[in-house]
Amino acid sequence: MKVALFVPCFIDAFYPQVGVATLELLERLGVDVDYPRDQTCCGQPMANSGAHKEAAGAERVFARNFADYDYVVGPSASCTHHVREHFTAIEQTSAVQKVRRSTFELVEFLHDVLKVREFPWAEFPHRVGLHNSCSAVRHLRETSNSEVAGAPFSKPRALLEGVKGIEFVTPARPDECCGFGGTFSVTEEAVSVRMGQDKVRDHVGAGAEYIVSGDMSCLMHQQGCAERLKVEAKFIHIAQVLNGARA
Amino acid sequence: MTTRDAFLSKIRAAQPASRPRPDVPVFPSPEGDLKTRFTLALTTMGGTCVHAHSFDEVKEMIAARFGADAVVTSAVAGIEGTRALAPDTAPASLQDVDVGIVRGRFGVAETGSVWFSENEYVVNSIGYLVQHLVVLLDPAQLVDGLQQVYRRPDFQSARYAALVTGPSATADIEGVLIRGAQGVRSLTVVWIQ
Amino acid sequence: MTKTVRIDHAKAAGAFLQKTDHVAFHDKRLWDLRSKRDAQAHGIPEWEALRELASGIKEHTLSNLADYIAQFADQAEKNGVVVHYAADAAEHNALVHQLMSERGMTTLVKSKSMLTDECYMRDYLEPRGITVMETDLGERIQQLDHQDPSHMVVPAVHKLRADVAELFGRTIGTDPANSDIHYLAESQRMDTRPYFVREKTAGMTGCNFAVAETGTVVVCTNEGNADLSANVPPLHIASIGIEKLIPTIADLGVFVRMLSRSALGSPITQYTSHFRAPRPGTEMHFILVDNGRSERLALDDFWYSLKCIRCGACMNTCPVYRRSGGLSYGGTYSGPIGAIINPTHDLKRYSSLPFASTLNGSCTNVCPTKVNIHEQIYKWREVIAERHEVPFVKQEVLKMAGRLLASPTLYRATVASLGGALKRLPNFVLYNPLNIWGRQRELPEAPTETFHEWYKKNRKSAK
């Protein structure tokens, strides 16, 4: 299968280690991964601001870069959700529709496509608060949610169960939004920060040493809040943990 | 003022293409004896349940609980209060009544509710203006749940119908539960045939 | 004609967040209601099926609304009810005034009605000599304080007991130092009670459900104040938004089961009242109100918001609402449902509301009639951007960002010097994201190289 790596713009700029971990992890699992060099952004920042037309340029670049792949894999649930559900600023040719259908968030790809559950090289001997972004929970349905009754399930948790040494601790409000929300984090700064502080305190209150997530944007926001509050918590992306990071 | 035709035309022009009406099934009921379920539900909503075998017993209970001097009015034939009640009694005149006695037509196990219409109340304000309500209820007249209640024909003929579940309540200030908001301060169901 | 003032949700929310005791209570109280809702919803195996049915019944009704309203009105008239039609708030208010003044009535006792709040009915009636007594405790508090309700079900949830004590002390003569809640509630009961039994008084209720089959108006309260307002005075006026229609009495078996469970986590409200015909010798009048609803019904993307049954579950679950307080939304309706209803009344005024959201989708999951709230919030953003009314960023900036991200070379050049570029933002950007981010959060450290650069160095056969 032909797999391409999609590295979201802010990960490229601020958290390259997450992109590196994603690539290395896929390679460890025997996947031959391309990284199309001309990729820029999926268009979400413009689209989420309502600027649908302004997202077209980025979407065109995305569609062009990822045209020839069976799977487009990226370490971000919100970007993946945008591509699969809101990537409509450009003409919906069959090629574009194929790119949209083929785009997967990393956890989805590992859990549903590669169906991998074991990560023998990985060990993470820490108490972990697993934070699943709202995109992961409610839009990509990677986990059950607390609003709708049903058998509980969690794809990210299922993967992390394959990592030695993790002790999971659960916050009181397991799937309340942490308050990043894209431009919301700036335009509604006071509310965003309060939500981030509450989230961090909830995890730390449950005993978490590390907050692990598949969405670096949530972690960036929570880490920003925690550091300013001088709350003891460390933050790491799920790709890094699965790839063998010890801390 | 807008005419009916103009009002409806605007809506007709706006409404989307017709969607079909879903079939509403009757869902299975939870387990449990109706009276037990009713009692639990009503207690949760702040009502109480007692038993009586006769109207005299009911009157004694009221006197014991509310005092021999309580002003009592009754919508139930066969029980007299201290204040007469007739269909032409002024609704506002019940404002100084301590205890109202009414009979519910049926109760609802799912919610602990009792159903009344203007027939049961005689004067509707008795359900709300008095301080305390005593509700006679025949345990044989218990219906499973709201699904069943709303398929009954009673709503077609009643001019006014109320499902009453416990006493009046509010939690509008800091979420603290208050019984006896605007309506009655207490509601007691008396199981009696 | 006054110039439209844009509601600044973020600023108002920031002010609310300064009141730490209020925010802590507000968030906890509403999360508690959400948890109680969960317990009810998870305790009924058919809950999701009921949501689907409620949604289906509402969509069917709204898409056949004219016929259902006609049926409702015909039945009501057969029952001896007088039916009126108000195109807008002004007509509604004038009608209420006319009905009362024709009968020499000078006092109106009423139970809670979001519709009458939406019409600003009190502001119309009071200068015309009508005393309006809001009998719901939360609405009464807000009436005395000259504020909108902050929540559809618990209108004064943003206040603490000391606030109510101070308010009642100032307005109804209680002891301002006594903030015991039982004392405050009892005081309101005793202060309000005389109004139900007064002469020259009309009673008004809202309407939770209007049943076409029988011409019945259904009103749900916990206090019993709707029953008092309707059953004591000789005139009962019910104000009915046209979206309240449902086809049959049997349908109440779906809606009544869901309303209080969604709102408060209790199986039913203390009083569920069904008004079909007037008491002999008295009058019952229904006022059907449009006030922008038919306009909304014609909007392909937004008519689903008319399915709303006013339970407030979306507010209780919304993490933004719980921390901002309902007054920060600047209108009768707040929270997630407010964000999608209010822009239909005034797009510019309410343009910040669809952005007061993280699009997390929790609201949509708890809505008993499956209103796709977060999806409509997203769509409103597009409408607002098309009209160049995005409150926090100018169209030029969005265009520039779009062009930047459409050009791999430009983008790469920018990212390479990211620290510098962001510090030199053009001065027509309203918000400098770095300054704002940095108020209460640490900034992420700028790494030594981007992923792109790492890949070039570390993977030879680059593609």
Image (cartoon, rainbow, N blue to C red):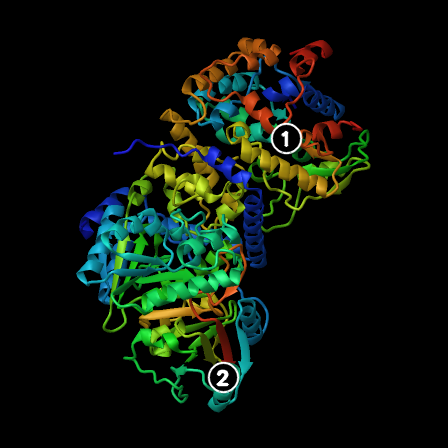
In the displayed structure, B13 sits above or below C50; it is above
Please state the horizontal and vertical placement of residue C386, each as a whole percent of the image.
37, 25
Whether residue A45 appears in this view of the structure is yes
User: Do dots 1 and 2 share one subunit?
Assistant: no
Instruction: Check disc 1 and give the amino acid type.
Output: Asp
Whether residue B15 appears in this view of the structure is no
Please state the horizontal and vertical placement of residue A136, each as a whole percent of the image.
60, 36
Q: Which residue is mark 2?
A: B67
Q: Nearer the viewer, residue B49 or C42?
A: B49
C392 sits to left or right of C457 = left
Residue A215: numbered disc: 1
Please state the horizontal and vertical placement of residue C32, each as a whole percent of the image.
58, 52
Q: Nearer the viewer, residue B23 or C300?
A: C300
B174 sits to left or right of C87 = right
Question: Image point 36% across, 34% down: which residue?
Answer: C349
Q: Chain of mark 2?
A: B
In the displayed structure, C414 sits above or below C166; it is above
Distance of label 1 from label 2 (alpha carbons): 67 Å
Question: Image point 27% across, 64% down: which residue?
Answer: C201
C274 sits to left or right of C234 = right
Instruction: Check disc 2 and give the amino acid type.
Output: Gly
Question: Image point 31% across, 57% down: which residue?
Answer: C132
